[in-house]
Image (cartoon, rainbow, N blue to C red):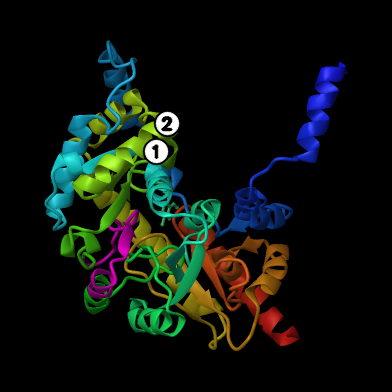
Amino acid sequence: MSTIIQDVTARIAAQPTLARRAKAFEVSPWAEAWDLVSRHPDPIYFGNGAPAHEAQPLDRLREAGARAWTEADGVLDYGEVEGYRPLRELIAARMAIRGMPIDPDEVMITNGSQQGIDLVARLMLDPGDRIVVEGPVYIGAMQTFDAYEASYLVVPVDDEGLDVAALERLLETTGARPKLIYTVPTFQNPTGITMTGARREALLALARERAILVLEDDPYGELYYGSAPEAPLRALDPAVVHLGTFSKTIAPGIRVGWTVAPRRLMDLLLMAKEGSDIHTDRIITRTVYHTADGFLDTHIAALRELYRRRRDTLLAGLRRHLPSDVTWSCPGGGFFVWVRLPGEADADALLPLAAAEGVAFLPGSWFYPAGQKEHTGFRLSFSSLPIDRIEEGTRRLGAAIEMFLMTT
Ligand SMILES: Cc1ncc(COP(=O)(O)O)c(C=O)c1O
């Protein structure tokens, strides 16, 4: 090895100049459960929060992609930071149907909603700033907020969603002045719970009174399996910043989502986006437009059927196989069910036992900021598993939990 390469290798190994925030990137929470269960010859993994492969409209995407490439002349230059206008118009029209009449200029296309979380955090958070999150909270959002060295106020989620009275008490007792409330009010990741209308009103009133920005993350709102859920927070208050995505209704690999924000904030978010990646891929945004236009409603109707059957199978399997003192959420949509073990039973300790039975989940402790663990819950995702695997998975899970509760 040349001395230059040796020198560079040594310097990288020593990592002398990492920022404080680099700690946020030390572990991948996703890898661990899969690693455990993949040692089993026939693993069933309830950890994957992605859509089903068979739900991805591949033929439609191919055709739309071919069309996008035929229009590519001039499109391969740098372009509009805010994204392809027809796609923003399509999003605005879809949002109007859900009670959010917005101007396409209030929509910015992003690389998934994950980038929306990042850009809002970038704009709002100085190191040490307080932010309110749900307990449990979407892991990916925490990864982003950690990178901005946010300090968390964790508010419990009960059957009616984020407990606004508990948040109010927390603010009173701590005197904290958070800048941001991050919430997934509809079919929450990881609990599947939906915030009631009364809670939505109360949360927005509190946010207005204390001048806190509400960041609503809404990847699952269109994936409901009975009646439509409560209107999004953005429908009740135009000051809310709203995030949407095509990851769950088309495919996550295309990385196309959107952020809706009031104009003043939008101007800053656009500059933050420009500084981050200039704009989202101009071919893929056209591909998504041609895919969605005249097709997405029919496609989503089929997805609702597919996922409703999977959810029902999971809930029936849990009823059949889990001990009677274990409880779980019954989501009206989305991808997740949250299971709670009785007493002080620890889902982290259950995981290796379940993995040995060939079934894995994401334990609740991963959905809390460091040092604020909750041990009894865990997340099951039903979106990507076929019916027979869900049935067999709940049988294995029941056996593992019974064994676990007998021995602890
Ligand atoms: C609540 C929540 N927000 C954001 C994301 C990221 O979505 P995207 O693929 O649009 O970045 C996910 C994905 O699982 C999610 O569950």
Please identify the quadrant where the C terminus is shown.
Answer: bottom right
In percent of width and height, residue 19 lies at 64, 45
Report whether residue 162 is seen.
yes
Q: Secondary structure at mark 2?
A: helix
- Residue 111 numbered mark, or none: 1
Does the magenta run of residues contain 208?
yes
Q: Of label 2 and label 1, which has the lower sequence position?
A: 1
In this rendering, position of residue 268 left or right of residue 341: left
> In the image, is residue 74 part of the stretch drawn in magenta?
no
Q: Are the residues tagged 2 and 1 within 8 Å (C-beta)?
A: yes
Q: Which residues are magenta?
A: 205-227
Q: Which mark is residue 298?
A: none
Dot 1 beta carbon under 8 Å from ligand 1: yes
The residue lying at 58 percent from left, 86 percent from top is 342
| Neighbour tally class for label 2: few under 14, some 14-19, many 20 plus, Cα within 10 Å | few
- Label 1 packing within 10 angstroms: few (<14), some (14-19), many (20+): many
Q: Which residue is identified by label 2?
A: 277
